[in-house]
Amino acid sequence: MAERTPLLNYRLYTAPEPGGGAPGARREARHSPPKKLSTFFGVVVPTLLSMFSVVLFLRIGFVVGQAGLYQTILMFIVAYLIISMTVLSVCAISTNGALDAGGAYYMISRALGPEFGGSIGIMFFFANICGSALYILGLVESIVDIFGLPPTGQATGIQVLPNAYWYELLYGTVILILCLLVCLVGADIYAKASFIIFIVVIVVLGTIFISFFAVSPRSINITVSLGNSSKFFEASFTGFKLSTLKSNLPPKYIADYTTGTMMNFAAVFAVMFNGCTGIMAGSNMSGDLKNPSYSIPRGTITAVIFTYIIYTILSLMVSCTCERLLLQKNYGFLKDINVWHPFVIIGIYSSTLSAAMSTLIGASRILYALAKDDIFGKLLMAAKKTSQGGNPWAAVLISSVLVQVRKYLLMLDVRKDHVKFWRPQILLMVANPRTSTQLISFINDLKKSGLYVLGHVQKGNLDEMPSDPLQAQYDSWLSLVDALNVKSFVSLTLSDSVRHGVQHLLFISGLGGMRPNTLILGFYDDCMPENGLQRISAFSDNSSSVINEQDSSLHFPPVRDAWSSKALSGKEYVAIISDSIKMLKNVCLARYFCQLNKTDLFSRKNYEVSIDVWPLNPLRPDSANYVDTCSLFLLQMACILNMVRSWRSAKLRIFLCVESGNSVGEHEKKLKQLLSQLRIKGSIQTLHWDSVAALHWHKQMPQEGGSEGSFANNFPSNAMKISDDYLMAVNNMILEQGTHPAIRFLYLPRPPADITLHERYLEQLDIMTKNLGPTLLIHGISAVVSTDL
């Protein structure tokens, strides 16, 4: 029985036939393209760039700051022992015969057989696809952070790029097209582009090492947004000092300032190990190497040794020169201590672009190899096509298309809850569309390309009904959405109570990671509702449209009159607010939006439209805190509105309420500094409100009885009672501030824990916002701003 030789059966090596082989074989050899890449250009450079990536510039300080120098060196030793096992296996397999394109896949196939190799090869392929999308989106984020327009649209000289989700998707697409063009031309141009990027990264790395010696000791100001406040730190670059080295030797694990997660050895090692991967970048180019069996082992080992030396030396220099606080609170510190700050940014951009190209071309080579071996039959037949030069252009195109499906799927990633990815995902509860048209249109401006869901709860029990009453209503709601020209989904539910229905919608609305994080409710008051459908041409009586308000197909209830009861009580309304906060949703209450006429507002001549922001908690004025989570959320939402094209001409005014003698200048200075760091260009209006605050401090209301009543706020540190006189004074103070603004953003205090005080809570909100015009009361629990790179 003949011996079954895997190398012969699997076409990894073909022995020459006597007499020069068959004519067909000679003809194939004449047309096969020459392989051009050397060890350095084909293996060393791609592997070095893949292993460095952005970890070199943004994570070395994190690792040393958390783990200390001793454990950092231990981590690198362990990591490189792990990858050495893989490298040695790669070397052994690659030297045991000829290699074709998609080297990583072929190595596994040779070791485990083609069927098993194909299953792992497809995983390699999708890993490269996801990696390319990740690098591209990371590059876009970094570019937008520096060159993107600030929220208000008032920018510095270099801030020229529009900043919104679809614009970021556009930038990512442009970068992907750039990578695609390089990869379509072929491996030769890819190698040249990688070499140019390699030179840039090495120059940047050289400036980093020079900076440790050339830059004099200095203090670096750091602002960190954590939890309910922004904290300011002053850290030091000390230069080479023995005391600095000693302080950085042992580990000191603290919470990561970007996520708030407590770090430990395993978590830090996981972050660091990412910088040690990428060793297969050269192997994936095997089909384009002159001598893959020679180049892959030598090139990969060279890159691994070089990166290990660089990481170790850089960790030592960081430990000798940088204070622990600087490393733990500022992961981009290398930019601040560099002889020329933009060098590090250039290095980040270059290495990330190289990694994106490397993973894209690696994915295409693996796909081409899978297609050529017919493991998936005709499914991958298109990926077999190559150019005259042997470049698998069809596989490159398919790979790039998948990198683009991947970027859309990132919208559905439930793990993307970091502040840098935050967008308002809004659920607007609508009791009756007839009375909510202006509010529906306004919230469409406020959503900033995020999710927008119109929710409605119909009270009832399906057991007592012959059929689902909601199905017949969807067409009417969709007609309303079209008529108002808003981009929103409609979500209707049937429930025994409005409160339970809102809970259902908060739980189930959305898709994947696009789930509501902000609930918006109309204000609970005794104002007579107005029929807003009459203002819309598609629903007016004299409209030529097929659908109008009198059409019987519109399943909207008539406008509630003065004698009709509301669908829910005041206590249930406040309970909905409390439920939402428990579910970690931001809450907004909208009042007087029936008075908002945006067309008339911006058509007036010589009239300055303003957006007023009052970030102080009116029911706890003694806190005087403008940087808690709720206040920052308030500022963010106002800025989001100001970013909308139709609202950009409006002026943002932030009101700072201070008492005389309480370091007025210092408060204003800190607020200006915060606005500057958050790139908010609004003007600060400082108000001395001693007379108003005095009513809060000194006016004591009866504990029981009386028409005014009293309310004890549920903040443990504040036992003061809030009087109606104080609330009316706050209301008057807001009304007295110049011309009527288009919108007012006010701080919504948290509802009291005692449910017996819920109705009093509503009374207080009613007094405070009476006759203020369109007003949005906001309680934010999401961290929505960051000053980090």
Image (cartoon, grey):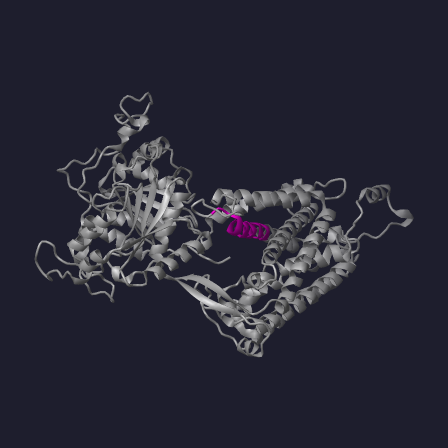
Name the chief secondary structure element in magenta. helix
Name of the residue lying farthest toward the right: 19
Visible residue check, residue 680: yes
| 519 displayed left or right of 705 | right
In this view, the residue in front, 491 or 25, is 491
Q: Quadrant of the image for the N terminus? A: bottom right
278 is within the stretch colored magenta: no
Q: Position of residue 230 (x, y in %)?
A: 40, 61
145 is within the stretch colored magenta: yes
Name which residue lies at 65% across and 59% down.
204
Q: Position of residue 283 (x, y in %)?
A: 70, 56
In this view, the residue in front, 347 or 422, is 347
| 388 displayed left or right of 641 | right
Magenta highlight range: 131-149
| 2 displayed left or right of 459 | right
Q: Position of residue 436 (x, y in %)?
A: 28, 37
In this view, the residue in front, 746 or 280, is 746
In this view, the residue in front, 362 or 24, is 362
Total numbered labels: 0
Q: Position of residue 584 (x, y in %)?
A: 34, 56
Visible residue check, residue 5: no
| In the rendered image, the vertical position of residue 677 relative to residue 249, given as above or below | above
